[in-house]
């Protein structure tokens, strides 16, 4: 009888050890999952924050472009020394196709429809050799950017495309066409791989 009782106790101890090991394994898996979820949440929050910085940068680029176009800002824009560049009655200073990449006309792009598709969609605005205008180039405004801290890695940049104004009540004849401007602005986040693009239509 004593021998049978000893065998039974040994079996129970072995079963208890297996159960403890299973519970320990489950606890470890739950702990690892909790850590992974926490890290993913932190990474998502950081990406959202970086994108918001890029989006705010792109919005600042839109504002700079509007000041570049607006004749009332002549006192602070070197481009507006030539007031006929952004004339809502003609686009004589706009290229026949593509975008101008240098000089006083940098960032000015052809009338929509002159090329195969929207120019903003075909131009790599992230490239340093793109025809885009860097923030402040013509308005003399400053923008805080650079490495380190929670700020954009680079200043925003933009292009300006001409569009035919189709607002109700305007004369549709070619001789009376009016024009407005589509601004496409690219903003950067704290890292080079974080970008945001915003657009606006500006009518003078």
Image (cartoon, rainbow, N blue to C red):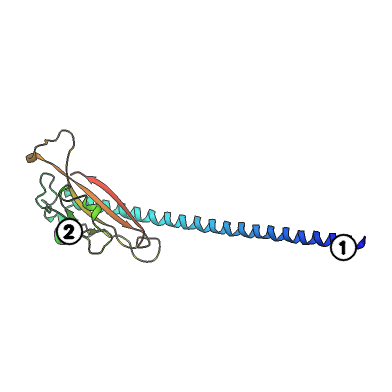
Residue sitting at 57 percent across and 57 percent down? 33
Task: Pick out the residue farthest to the bottom.
Answer: 147
* Residue to which mark 2 is pinned: 106
**Helix or strand or loop: what does disc 1 sit on?**
helix
Looking at the picture, how far across and down is residue 182, in whole percent?
22, 48
Residue 121 visible in image = yes
Seen from the viewer's position, the closer of residues 129 and 89 is: 129
Residue sitting at 29 percent across and 58 percent down? 156
Quadrant of the frame with the N terminus: bottom right
Looking at the picture, how far across and down is residue 13, in whole percent?
79, 61
Q: Using residue 50 as the reference point, say whether residue 132 is left or right of it.
A: left
Seen from the viewer's position, the closer of residues 160 and 124 is: 124
Q: Are marks 2 and 1 in contact (CB under 8 Å)?
A: no
* Residue to which mark 1 is pinned: 6
Quadrant of the frame with the C terminus: top left
The residues bearing labels 2 and 1 have C-alpha atoms spaced at a distance of 93 Å
Residue 75 visible in image = no
Residue sitting at 11 percent across and 44 percent down? 89
Residue 110 vertical placement versus 191 (above, below): above
**Mark identifier at residue 183:** none
Task: Pick out the residue farthest to the left.
Answer: 175
Mark 2 vs mark 1: in front: 1
> How many residues crowd mark 1 within 10 Å: few (<14), some (14–19), many (20+)?
few
Residue sitting at 11 percent across and 36 percent down? 172
Seen from the viewer's position, the closer of residues 21 and 5 is: 5
Task: Pick out the residue farthest to the right.
Answer: 1
> How many residues crowd mark 2 within 10 Å: few (<14), some (14–19), many (20+)?
many
Looking at the picture, how far across and down is residue 175, in whole percent?
6, 40
**Helix or strand or loop: what does disc 2 sit on?**
loop
Looking at the picture, how far across and down is residue 140, in whole percent?
22, 59
């Amino acid at each position: 009888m004593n021998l049978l009782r000893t065998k039974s106790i040994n079996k129970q101890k072995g079963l208890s050890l297996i159960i403890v090991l299973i519970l320990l394994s489950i606890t470890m898996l739950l702990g690892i999952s909790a850590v992974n979820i926490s890290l993913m949440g932190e990474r998502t929050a950081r990406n959202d924050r970086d994108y918001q910085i890029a989006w705010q940068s792109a919005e600042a680029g839109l504002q700079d472009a509007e000041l570049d176009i607006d004749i009332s800002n002549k006192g602070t824009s070197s481009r507006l020394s030539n007031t006929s560049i952004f004339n809502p009655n003609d686009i004589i200073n706009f290229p026949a196709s593509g975008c101008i990449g240098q000089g006083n006309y940098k960032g000015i792009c052809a009338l929509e429809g002159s090329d195969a598709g929207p120019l903003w969609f075909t131009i790599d605005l992230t490239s340093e050799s793109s025809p885009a205008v860097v923030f402040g180039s013509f308005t003399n405004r400053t923008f805080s950017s650079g490495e380190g801290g929670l700020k954009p890695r680079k200043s925003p940049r933009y292009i300006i495309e001409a569009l035919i104004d189709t607002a109700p009540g305007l004369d549709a004849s070619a001789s009376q066409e009016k024009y407005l401007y589509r601004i496409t602005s690219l903003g950067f986040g704290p890292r080079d791989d974080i970008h945001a693009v915003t657009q606006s239509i500006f009518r003078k």
